[in-house]
Amino acid sequence: MTKIETLLTQVGTHSDEKTGAINAPIYLSTAYRHAGLGESTGFDYTRTKNPTRSVLEEEFARLEGGDACFACSSGMAAIHLILSLFKTGDAVIYPEDLYGGTYRLATQYEAQYGIQAIFNDFSSLEEVEQLVIEHPVKAIFLETPTNPLMQEISIEECVKIAKKYGILLIVDNTFLTPYYQRPIELGADIVMHSGTKYIGGHNDVLAGLVVSKGAELSERLFLQHNAIGMTLSPFDSWLLLRGLKTLHLRMKQHTANAQAIVAFLEKSPHIRDVLYAGRGGMVSFRLQSGKQIDPFLRNLKLIAFAESLGGVESFITYPTTQTHADIPEEIRNARGVDDSLLRFSVGIEEAEDLIADLQNVFNVLESEAIVHD
Ligand SMILES: *Cc1c(COP(=O)(O)O)cnc(C)c1O
């Protein structure tokens, strides 16, 4: 079987047999001419199907091992598409440690549409199974590793529960990408991504991707994707195709750099703890005190204090006021997303330079005697 590195590099290279173009052409046309009644090239109107978006969707479905893919205008639009499968009275289980936007949408839909959102820490899967038995649960929506605490949840074990009770297993695979983790091969029904992150990879495109397994589920998602209309533009589809070509190289470098950063941080007296899943570019860590956060962020020179992840450039995010600001403080603190926690999206710069940037910040903290209580 062709290796994923080769599949990634070759995405779209055979998409235009007419000209032999190596890169998928960008079709901006929103409408397509028909020769006569009942005749179509397969394309009628771009919301329903666009040739550039179709190349991305076919390639990405293959990379995740699914039957169909739906490219959306953002990761949140992708989650909205998935949640549109449910109706009033249905329940969905989520890990407590979750992307803030997913938490916001899930709780909003509970209040507005009565789609119950159940949160659990997933430390006991027997407890998760009990929730499935006791509530009208239609799906488990996982993130693994979780965001921002990097807790790993076994997809295989959750697949067993989902199959036993005939419910869907949905995995947000934004952090590890199909390069490291392919949940559908493990038995998941739906995989979604914020394509804004590692898939695009360059902090220049907002996108979402939903991949499904099975004809009936894929058909329902296809109808909703077209009906709601949160489809990805042709140009943005092309940017994701371009990003995919180097995904494997970027992920390897993100991992190598993240491992070097983890080794450095673990030795620093300024760091209380470091959370890392062993692969990928996402590292979370706690400073000794929340008081050090502002001087820490203010003195970074190379690493940007910015709210996103998965790009080639290194970013540090403060979940308390950024990604997780919509989770009430009490709940956030109880779950461990406290005011000393930072989330580092380690980029693909030279690790030595990233470490020097952090060391410089620590030196400033020491010289200004901004020490912990
Ligand atoms: C960013 C992100 C989302 C939301 O994606 P957008 O592209 O910002 O809409 C969902 N899940 C995770 C894990 C994310 O990091």
Image: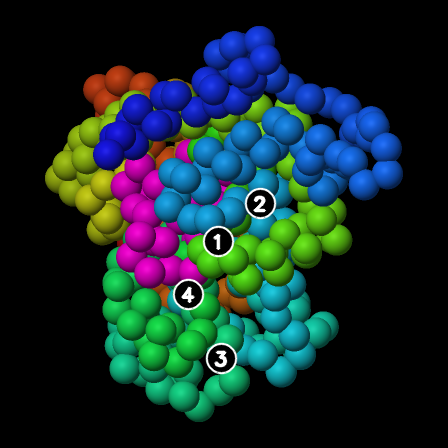
In the image, farthest residue toward the right: 37
Residue 70: image tag? 2
Dot placed on the residue nearer the N-terminal end, 4 or 1: 4
Instruction: Find numbered disc 3 in the image and state the secondary structure of the residue it sits on.
Output: strand
Question: Is 196 in the magenta?
Answer: yes
Residue flagged by tag 2: what amino acid is it?
Phe
Q: Residue at x 26, y 18 (%)?
A: 350
Mark 1 neighbour density, 10 Å: few (under 14) some (14–19) many (20 or more): many
Q: Is residue 47 above or below residue 360?
A: below
Instruction: Find numbered disc 2 in the image and state the secondary structure of the residue it sits on.
Output: strand
Dot placed on the residue nearer the N-terminal end, 3 or 4: 3
Q: Position of residue 192 (x, y in %)?
A: 48, 50
Q: According to the image, label 1 marks what residue? A: 212
Q: Residue at x 30, y 61 (%)?
A: 155
In the image, farthest residue toward the bottom: 134
Alpha carbon distance from label 3 to label 1: 19 Å
Alpha carbon distance from label 3 to label 4: 11 Å
Q: Is residue 151 above or below residue 359?
A: below
Q: Residue at x 46, y 37 (%)?
A: 60
Residue flagged by tag 4: what amino acid is it?
Leu
The reply to whether residue 54 is visible in this rendering is yes
Read off the magenta span: 172-198
The reply to whether residue 360 is visible in this rendering is no
Q: Is residue 110 above or below residue 41?
A: below
Q: According to the image, label 3 marks what residue? A: 137
Residue flagged by tag 1: what amino acid is it?
Ser
Instruction: Find numbered disc 1 in the image and state the secondary structure of the residue it sits on.
Output: strand
